Image (cartoon, grey):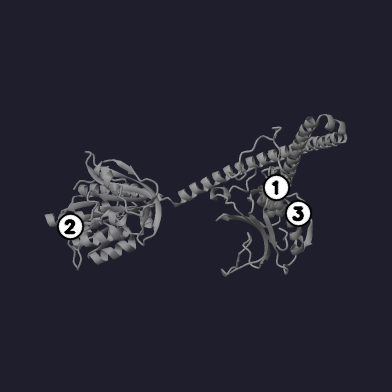
């Protein structure tokens, strides 16, 4: 026997379990191992005892005889020990027939030594097995500790390896699905269509390439849970370039998606803040411009109007001018009236602009008073009777006598109703009817109604008055109804014939025509702002040759 000098420090920690049912052979094998510097922790003569000793002593290596007494042999024992304990095993046997070798090979042994055993062969086999085991454990540790799931398959698409992360993600244990077809375990679904997609391992092996999954892919786990995944699949090749299988590396993509959504939300929030800041800057510039312009315009316009009034008085007092040059007198008076009319329009526009700015700035002063609507509203409507009569329109008002009092700003309310009546008189044709009605509502359709309680039951608050202005003979096109409350937007009036210029000396307008052209283009826009400032709402319904504006106001304004 050749003596091999080994590094005792290196192998002194190597513990070997001998499984041999022939006592003399077992003792000889123990002596040989100890002479090589290995530590024999025990000898077992049955497969059952070998499993028990391996579990108890946890040796570094097991020398296993294939033919053992008992119900199971060494191959079956080796398979159980490797499955449970992951201890490398070298078969030691006197049998080398084909069937025995094939059975042993299936268990992936770390070596195969035929009896009689030679010391040199034994040493080489043990060191080779230990080196292989160390290398495989290193690779297994790397795969096991990876943050991604790893699944390895052969050319038949059968699963040959799964790390712990893959087990956690799929919900399957490796031993449950070992040698199962990978598509039965790794079911991938398109997130948009919820249809199954082809496993990327298949094209990766067919084309001997690497495939990355596109975004929006879900993994269906063992219990049917769907989780977003990102992965790649690649083929495995031997040294000759022949495809021997495939490997898929995949991970739970939930956290990345959450982070991405959070980043997108943060970016959207940042962009929104920038937009809001820019809008606030623009609005401030607009308000400053309107304030400066309105104040600067009001003074010269008032002076012009005063000068026009003075000129008209002087002309009326100079009867000589009228007597000796009547045509020049009439023409001069005509143009002064035009100048006075246009000054009045511009002053009204300035007033409307200032009012809108004060409302937008929440600086419009409110003076609350108790309003008896059944007394107040007929008086407001009566002031428009002359205009309606001149235009041959029928103006009516219907107010129930038992209305509750309304607490609001009388000036703003009068301005709202007057503007709506002005608008109605302006667009109602001759012989058309204008009707003003008032209704009390316990359950109004209001921006703060209905309230929803915790139990899901809805109830309404804020009883209100509904003031409606109906006028016949005109329809507001549907596409214009959403725009009539925009500043400077005016409804088209196709029925009105084109008029000659006001600067034509032959032009003479009646009082009603002059009044019809006095709008600033801010009327309904201002009405909407005034109504909302009083915590109300305004709606318009138009069709079948009838248009109705309905203002809804709470009986009492609440402080917000």
Answer with the quarter of the image where residue 165 lies: bottom left
Q: Quick check: 106 left or right of 489?
A: left
Relative to 13, does residue 456 appear above or below in the rendering? Answer: below
Q: Nearer the viewer, residue 440 or 51?
A: 440
Instruction: Report the number of discs.
Output: 3
Q: Position of residue 152 (x, y in %)?
A: 29, 50
Residue 41 at least partly seen: no
Q: Disc 3 designates what residue?
A: 383
As measured in the structure, the alpha-carbon distance from the residue carrying label 2 to the one carrying label 3 is 112 Å
Relative to 278, does residue 39 appear above or below in the rendering? Answer: below
Q: Residues within 10 Å of mark 1 (few under 14, many from 20)?
A: some
Which circle, 2 or 1, is nearer the viewer?
Answer: 1
Q: Quadrant of the C terminus?
A: bottom right
Q: Disc 1 designates what residue?
A: 360
Q: Position of residue 126 (x, y in %)?
A: 26, 50
Q: Position of residue 159 (x, y in %)?
A: 27, 53
Residue 354 at least partly seen: yes
As measured in the structure, the alpha-carbon distance from the residue carrying label 2 to the one carrying label 1 is 90 Å
As measured in the structure, the alpha-carbon distance from the residue carrying label 1 to the one carrying label 3 is 30 Å
Q: Residues within 10 Å of mark 2 (few under 14, many from 20)?
A: few
Q: Earlier in the sequence, mark 1 or mark 3?
A: 1
Q: Disc 2 designates what residue?
A: 103
Q: Earlier in the sequence, mark 2 or mark 1?
A: 2
Q: Nearer the viewer, residue 471 or 167?
A: 471
The kind of secondary structure element at disc 1 is: helix
Which circle, 2 or 3, is nearer the viewer?
Answer: 3
Q: Quick check: 361 left or right of 151?
A: right
């Amino acid at each position: 026997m050749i003596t091999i000098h080994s590094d005792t420090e290196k192998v002194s920690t190597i513990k070997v379990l001998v499984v041999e049912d022939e006592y003399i052979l077992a003792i000889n094998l123990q002596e040989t191992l100890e002479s090589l510097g290995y530590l024999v922790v025990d000898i077992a003569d049955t497969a059952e005892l070998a499993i028990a000793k391996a579990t108890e002593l946890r040796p570094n290596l097991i020398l296993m005889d294939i033919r053992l007494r008992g119900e199971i042999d060494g191959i079956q024992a080796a398979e159980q020990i490797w499955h449970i304990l992951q201890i490398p095993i070298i078969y030691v046997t006197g049998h080398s027939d084909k069937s025995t070798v094939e059975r042993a090979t299936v268990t992936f042994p770390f070596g195969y030594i035929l009896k009689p055993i030679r010391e040199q062969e034994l040493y080489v086999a043990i060191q080779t097995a230990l080196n292989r085991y160390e290398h495989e454990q290193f690779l297994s540790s790397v795969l096991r500790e990876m943050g991604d799931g790893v699944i390895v398959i052969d050319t038949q698409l059968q699963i040959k390896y799964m790390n712990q992360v893959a087990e956690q993600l799929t919900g399957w244990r490796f031993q449950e699905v070992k040698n199962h077809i990978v598509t039965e375990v790794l079911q991938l679904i398109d997130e948009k269509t919820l249809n199954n997609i082809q496993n990327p391992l298949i094209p990766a092996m067919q084309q001997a390439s690497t495939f990355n999954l596109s975004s929006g892919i879900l993994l269906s786990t063992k219990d049917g849970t769907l989780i977003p995944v990102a992965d790649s699949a690649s083929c495995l090749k031997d040294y000759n370039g022949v495809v021997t299988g495939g490997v898929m590396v995949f991970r739970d993509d939930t956290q990345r998606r959450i982070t991405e959504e959070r980043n997108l939300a943060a970016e959207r929030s940042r962009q929104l803040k920038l937009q809001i800041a820019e809008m606030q800057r623009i609005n401030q510039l607009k308000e400053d411009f309107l304030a400066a312009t309105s104040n600067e315009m009001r003074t010269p316009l008032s002076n012009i109007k005063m000068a026009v009034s003075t000129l008209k008085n002087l002309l009326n007092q100079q009867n000589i001018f009228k007597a000796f040059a009547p045509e020049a007198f009439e023409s001069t008076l005509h143009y002064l009236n035009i100048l006075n009319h246009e000054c009045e329009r511009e002053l009204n526009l300035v007033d409307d602009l200032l009012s809108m700015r004060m409302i937008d700035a929440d600086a419009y002063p409110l003076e609350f008073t108790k309003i008896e609507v059944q007394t107040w509203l007929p008086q407001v409507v009566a002031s428009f009777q002359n205009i309606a009569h001149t235009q041959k329109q029928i103006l009516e008002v219907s107010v129930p006598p038992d209305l509750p009092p309304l607490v609001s700003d009388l000036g703003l309310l009068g301005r709202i109703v007057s503007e709506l009546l002005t608008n109605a008189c302006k667009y109602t044709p001759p012989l058309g009817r204008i009707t003003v009605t008032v209704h009390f509502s316990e359950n109004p359709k209001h921006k703060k109604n209905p309230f929803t309680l915790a139990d899901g039951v809805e109830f309404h608050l804020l009883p209100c008055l509904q003031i409606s202005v109906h006028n016949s003979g005109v329809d507001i096109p549907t596409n214009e109804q959403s725009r009539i409350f925009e500043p400077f937007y005016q409804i088209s009036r196709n029925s009105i014939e084109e008029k000659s210029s006001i600067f034509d000396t032959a032009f003479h307008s009646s009082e009603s025509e002059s009044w019809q052209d006095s709008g600033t283009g801010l009327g309904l826009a201002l009405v909407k702002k005034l109504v909302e400032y009083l915590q109300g709402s305004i709606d318009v319904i138009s069709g079948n040759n009838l248009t109705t504006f309905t203002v809804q106001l709470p009986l009492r304004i609440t402080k917000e």
